[in-house]
Amino acid sequence: MGYWDADYAIKNTDVLAMFRMTPQKGVDPVECAAAIAGESSTATWTVVWTDLLTACDLYRAKAYRVDPVPGAQDQYFAYIAYELDLFEEGSLSNLTASIIGNVFGFKAVNALRLEDMRMPVAYLKTY
């Protein structure tokens, strides 16, 4: 299972992010969205033997939708869902560092901006 799932059913406990992205020339927008989902979730985790004890697929972010930006050439909105368990309770710095920490220098994208986020009530109650 990868980081793209067009049939993903959003859960009310998911953290949702919408990025505005301009993929590098020759990079498919769906591939770019999946790469952003991976880079901002589990794709950069170091592989260790305990991975066999963890359901890593559960923690993968899911890029589930890509729409062209109206009136903008080669720009797209990428919609990504994150499992709430990826984040430390009551820590906005952990959540934002995880989602936007190092994806902005990612080679698959020419330009990237976080446009919107939805935090679930279950997460907000941890503050």
Image (cartoon, rainbow, N blue to C red):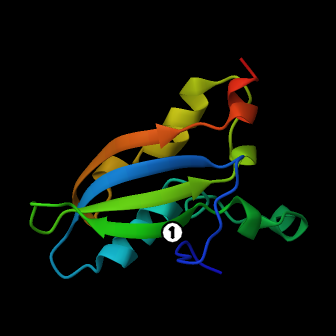
Q: Quadrant of residue 51?
A: bottom right
Q: Residue furthest right?
A: 53
- How many callouts does the rendering have? 1
Which quadrant of the view contains residue 45?
A: bottom right
Secondary structure under badge 1? strand
Residue 25 position, x and y percent, is 15, 76
| Left or right of 12 in this view: 99 | left
Where residue 66 sits in the image (x, y, percent)? 37, 69
**Disc 1 residue crowd, few under 14, some 14–19, many 20+, Cα 10 Å:** many
Q: Nearer the viewer, residue 122 or 97?
A: 122
> What residue sits 58% from the left and 25% below the top?
92
Depicted 119 relative to depicted 33: above or below:
above
Q: Is residue 34 left or right of residue 30?
A: right
Q: Is residue 106 left or right of residue 70?
A: right
Q: Position of residue 127 (x, y in %)?
A: 71, 17
Q: Is residue 119 above or below residue 92?
A: below
Q: Residue at x 32, y 58 (%)?
A: 106
Q: Residue furthest top?
A: 127
**At 16% across and 61% down in the image, what residue appears?**
70
Disc 1 target residue? 64
Amino acid bearing label 1: Tyr
Horizontal relation, residue 123 to residue 63: left or right: right
Vertical relation: 90 (above or below) 27 = above
Quarter containing the N terminus: bottom right
Where is 58 relative to 102, above or below?
below
Tell me what residue is drawn at x 52 percent, y 77 percent: 6
